Image: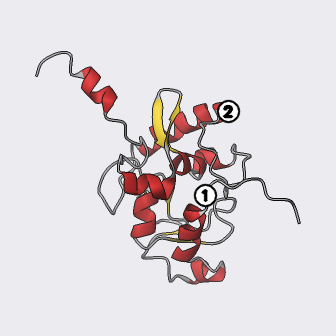
Amino acid sequence: GEGGGNAEMEERKFCRLCQSSSEEDAKLVGALLQYGKLWVHEMCARLSPLVTEQDRTPKAIRTGRAAENLVPHVTKEVRRAQRLKCPVCKKAGGSYGCNMPRCSKSYHLPCAMRGGCVCSDRFPESWDFYCKVHASHPDAKFVHAANFHLRRLLQRKAMPSAPKS
């Protein structure tokens, strides 16, 4: 139709990083939260390169809220990622780049997990993230990068604050 199609777009909320609105992906990468004007899954935002250093909340905890201080960083990340195409689904918004020099692959977070990407248990504090091709590279082996680490990171849910041991 012509004109007035805007309300329709507003209704269909999807993550501006991974481009997904599926329930399945939300289970994996957290709820769709509103960072300023942008809807982004919590973990797509919080683990991405331009955001993760600004995020003081332990990554094991899903807060279920869009932290105000992260809004400008999420906005920058969405802008940066629009130029990057995910090799798994071929859509824009892949902000998770392989750590190998000269590898230009950049993934959406859900695609990275399903697409055989690996990371170390220090990720994202240390960007030990590798695409499927470089998952078996000595550099990735050296930091014990495994898809298991990515899965474990994403499967942690909001936890009541446990007593410090």
Q: Residues within 10 Å of mark 2 (few under 14, many from 20)?
A: few
* Amino acid carrying mark 2 in the image: Asn
**Residue beneath disc 2:** 69
Residue drawn at the location 45% of the way across and 36% of the way down: 39
Dot placed on the residue nearer the N-terminal end, 2 or 1: 2
Mark 2 and mark 1 residues within 8 Å of each other at the beta carbon: no
The part of the image, by quadrant, that contains residue 165 is bottom right
Q: Position of residue 85 (x, y in %)?
A: 35, 53
User: Is 31 positioned to the left or the right of 159 in the image?
Assistant: left
User: Is 122 positioned to the left or the right of 111 in the image?
Assistant: right
**Residue beneath disc 1:** 157
Residue drawn at the location 74% of the way across and 46% of the way down: 56
Residue drawn at the location 64% of the way across and 64% of the way down: 123
Q: Position of residue 18 (x, y in %)?
A: 41, 49
Is residue 100 among what the camera can see?
no
* Amino acid carrying mark 1 in the image: Lys
